[in-house]
Image (cartoon, rainbow, N blue to C red):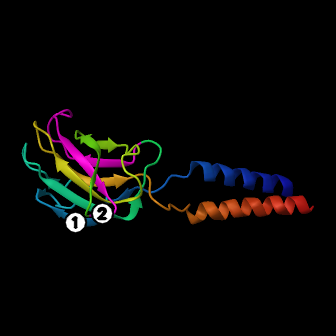
Amino acid sequence: MKKTFLTALFLACCASFGTAQAMPIYADIFVGSDGTSFGSGSVLGAPDGGGIFLGNPPSGQFLEVGFSTAIVDGAGDDIRIWDIESFSPDFGEVADVFGSTDGISFSLLGSVTGGSAAGFLDIGGAFAGPISFLRIVQTSTADAIDIDAIEAFHLAGTVPEPTILALMGLGLAGLGYRKRK
């Protein structure tokens, strides 16, 4: 009975460890913008239907935000730019995304296309080291991008959730207890 319980506990621990999902991390530092606010006027935190409109093309208007925990290049997409689109999904909204460690020197990470939901960007080695600041610059010749939120998927120094660590510890303790008997 004890062996069955401990084995089940260990397997549950391993399953939880492998399938854990991180909470979305959104930009939490507003640095500046020469765009026009709409709705809530905030691009910080989760999407809320309001944000900053980066002018009619070819304006070159910008938005600059920061993250308390730096972004790093990981597997797949690293950044998501949430865009509010009130017309067709392929209206031609385009913006260049630049990254910086210090908020002074920026390097081009790539371009995103707005639309009905979001623009994804894979840093893909375009920047060496952690990124603490993003600058988004309107480059579209068709329509302006309306930014609601900026989300990151891979953060420097991400630590597993305490619950997962506790389950892993219980599983290992169970294995140790089992071996002693």
* Most distant residue in the right direction: 181
The percent coordinates of residue 39 (x first, y second) are 15, 57
56 w.r.t. 91: above or below? below
In what quadrant of the picture does the C terminus appear?
bottom right
Please tell me which residue is depicted at 72% across the width and 50% down the height of the picture: 11
Residue placed under numbered mark 1 in the picture: 31
Q: Looking at numbered disc 2 in the image, what kind of residue is underneath it?
A: Gly
Q: Looking at numbered disc 1 in the image, what kind of residue is underneath it?
A: Val
Dot 2 or dot 1, earlier in sequence: 1
Please tell me which residue is depicted at 74% across the width and 59% down the height of the picture: 171
Answer whether labels 2 and 1 touch (C-beta < 8 Å): yes
The percent coordinates of residue 105 (x first, y second) are 26, 60
Q: In terms of secondary structure, where does tag 1 sit?
A: strand
Query: Could you say which disc has been placed on residue 159 in the image?
Result: none
Q: Dot 1 surroundings within 10 Å: few (below 14), some, or many (20 or more)?
A: few
Q: In terms of secondary structure, where does tag 2 sit?
A: strand
Q: Is residue 43 visible?
A: no
Question: Residue 87 lies in what quarter of the image?
Answer: top left
Please tell me which residue is depicted at 7% across the width and 48% down the height of the picture: 59
Q: Which of 67 and 123 is in front in this view?
A: 123
Q: Does the magenta stretch include residue 98?
A: yes
Q: Nearer the viewer, residue 63 or 1?
A: 63
In what quadrant of the picture does the N terminus appear?
bottom right
Residue placed under numbered mark 2 in the picture: 66
The percent coordinates of residue 43 (x first, y second) are 23, 59
Q: Is residue 168 magenta?
A: no
110 w.r.t. 102: above or below? above
Report whether 129 appears left or right of 94. Answer: right
Question: Residue 5 lies in what quarter of the image?
Answer: bottom right
Q: Give the range drawn in magenta.
A: 77-103
Q: Can residue 169 be seen in this view?
A: yes
Report whether 138 appears left or right of 158. Answer: left
